[in-house]
Amino acid sequence: MNILGKSRYHEVYARSLADPEGFWAEAAREIDWIEPAKKIFDSTQGAYGRWFTGAVVNTCYNALDRHVETGRADQLALIHDSPLTNTITKFTYAELLREVQTLAAIMTDFGVTKGDRVILYMPMVPEAVVAMLACARIGVVHSVVFGGFAAKELATRIDDARPKLIFSASCGIEPGRVVQYKPLLDEAIRLASARPDACIILQRPQAECDLTPRRDYDWASLRKKALLAGKLAPCVPVLATDPLYILYTSGTTGVPKGVVRDNGGHLVAVKWSMFNLYGVNPGEVWWCGSDIGWVVGHSYIVYGPLFHGATSVMYEGKPVGTPDAGAFWRVISEHKAVAFFTAPTAFRAIKKEDPEGKFIRQYDLSRFRTLFLAGERADPPTVEWAEAQLEVPVIDHWWQTETGWCIAGNPMGLGMLPVKHGSPTVPMPGYQVDVVDESAKPVPANTMGSIVIRLPMPPGCLPTLWQQEDRFRDAYLTEFPGYYKTSDAGFKDDDGYVFVMGRTDDIINVAGHRLSTGGMEEILASHPDVAECAVLGVNDAIKGEVPCGFLVLKAGVTRAPVEIEKEIVALVRERLGPVAAFKLAITVARLPKTRSGKILRGTMKKIADGEPWSMPATIEDPKVLEEIGAALKDRV
Ligand code: COA
Ligand code: AMP
């Protein structure tokens, strides 16, 4: 079968591997550098080498100033569409630049300078984008914490990043409820041992909050004063290898990993992807329906579209219920988006409400060219439904917080390759993706194994974890020497298509959100009545997976299990946050274990999912699995 078609992909990909420096030097011409790189790739620096060493650049300049200087001043840069507040707010490139220059000047007045860290704990409001770009403008390292995480998670990040300043808001808005952010922020600062110098708080009319004297400042007043005084901060030159941001992601324990993104590699790779992968042209409207708290939001709500001179849509709403399952089509049609990026879970939610796609046909989607899916495996039935309803290519692509951009995808700008349902298609330039066995030997096509990326990683990927170089090497580089370990398992077929089937660690994917079951187990185990526990991801028709916790109570506990289960559910919500969607805790007498004491999570999951399972040969007591089956009855 000739799967090549007319795509330039194979030629481009081959060149990226044969001459990586030539390839990325050419891609780097799309970026405005203050000083060019001394070396395109320096293999002597960092854990596996560094890209664009010696180059001097400013990320914000490339996102805003240069477009204003070259004719895009009056083009829309950002459209904020919020069905949750019934508002649509638009910023041209010139307007967004002015906001960013002003906020950067305010930050400078607070004594924040290059290399300092600033945390954002914010809902999906345009001010969050302004704050990220203002940090980039003055060389400050931002760390955005997703609003659905609890105070304790925020506290962990405050202690790790040690921010001088925190940006937050009085509230976020979820359907049917206003989420008060300020008590969560106050609690996080109380729990953390590091203290920010100040917090800048955006008062939202849906629920204003009290400001803590001598620590909290009202965002709007600061902005007004700075605008009146005409304060505008210039761009601060930084090294390409300096960090642009830290983004915390779930590790295999409760302690999150601070993924570091550098300025230069990120600029080059993300800019390259906008046309070559997503097929979007400068001046067009692009919509990424993620949250700025996730990597997808960083790369494709904020940075990618702006580096490219496109218009980015930022959406504060849900796929269903705000107000209905036509919300996505309304946004695409109203803002004339040519491409849209979301998670398969959102489509499953829409399909459930509107299986016949009636809402879709109420909107003019004539400009819409491509739907991109990522964040979790795009299950073939969902992809087929979306293809049939939308009549545009539906493109799955696979990546991670660590990589910052796509590892395997279908490059629309280079020419679309045939889609195979269940596969995110082929490796992107610079990624040599192998599937290996335990001894790091590549396995034959169509054989499952660990998916790894041959070092060096392409530009844009993480150079390290924030102040944890050893953890970086241990977690990613040690197990398969010469490779980066993705912790995903899967296979490549005869055509080189990658199939990503699941994680090899304890990470589960809940509605496209990455969560550690190990982290949840730590919370369950902290309950005074719990002797032992296990958390696993069980199948869910909408969210893909949801966590399910099994508890063994301490001997002598006489309280009703149902009460303890309720407390456990509340505890996870309080410590980890609502995003965990932890709603199921089940008390059992014992956990199934091997004779060496390992909990048989895999078999428990199969039982919970109603899949065929066989009795593990090493099981200590086969009867325990029957007990698990009985406990699960009527619960999942
Ligand atoms: N602040 C506070 N709480 C938040 C939050 C935020 N920013 N985001 C989510 N939550 C809360 C929700 O209100 C919900 O709380 P509840 O338990 O009281 O209902 C909980 O966290 C889980 O949220 P969510 O995962 O959004 O589930 P949902 O049931 O509200 O909606 C979907 C389900 C499928 C519609 C939704 O998950 C979705 O749109 N997913 C797409 C995600 C996406 O695009 N990801 C991109 C990654 S590539
Ligand atoms: P995150 O770092 O939160 O973006 O999550 C990354 C993880 O999500 C990956 O390691 C995969 O397990 C999963 N993932 C993301 N996109 C896909 C995809 N297109 N197909 C399969 N798994 C995916």
Image: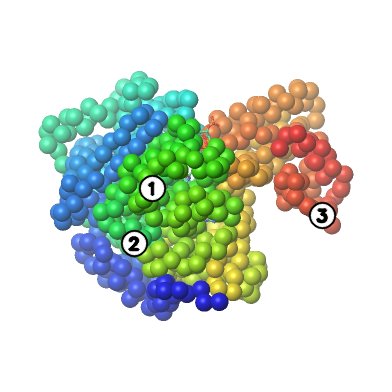
Q: Is mark 1 on a helix, strand or loop?
A: loop
Quadrant housing the N terminus: bottom right
Q: Position of residue 343 (x, y in %)?
A: 49, 48
Chain-order first, disc 1 or disc 2: 2
Q: In which quarter of the image is residue 520?
A: top right
Location of mark 1 (residue):
365
328 or 212, nearer to the observer: 328
In the image: residue 342, left or right of residue 435: left
**In the drawing, what numbered circle is on residue 614?**
3
Which residue is drawn at the image coordinates 82% and 45% (left, top)? 625
In the image: residue 231, left or right of residue 90: left
Q: Is mark 2 on a helix, strand or loop?
A: helix
Location of mark 2 (residue):
275
Q: For mark 1, does the 10 Å Cα neighbourhood hold few (<14), some (14 to 19), or many (20 or more) residues? A: some
Query: Is the residue under label 2 in contact with that under label 3 (CB below 8 Å)?
Result: no
Q: Distance between the residues labelled 3 and 1?
A: 49 Å
Q: For mark 3, does the 10 Å Cα neighbourhood hold few (<14), some (14 to 19), or many (20 or more) residues? A: few
Front disc: 3 or 1? 1
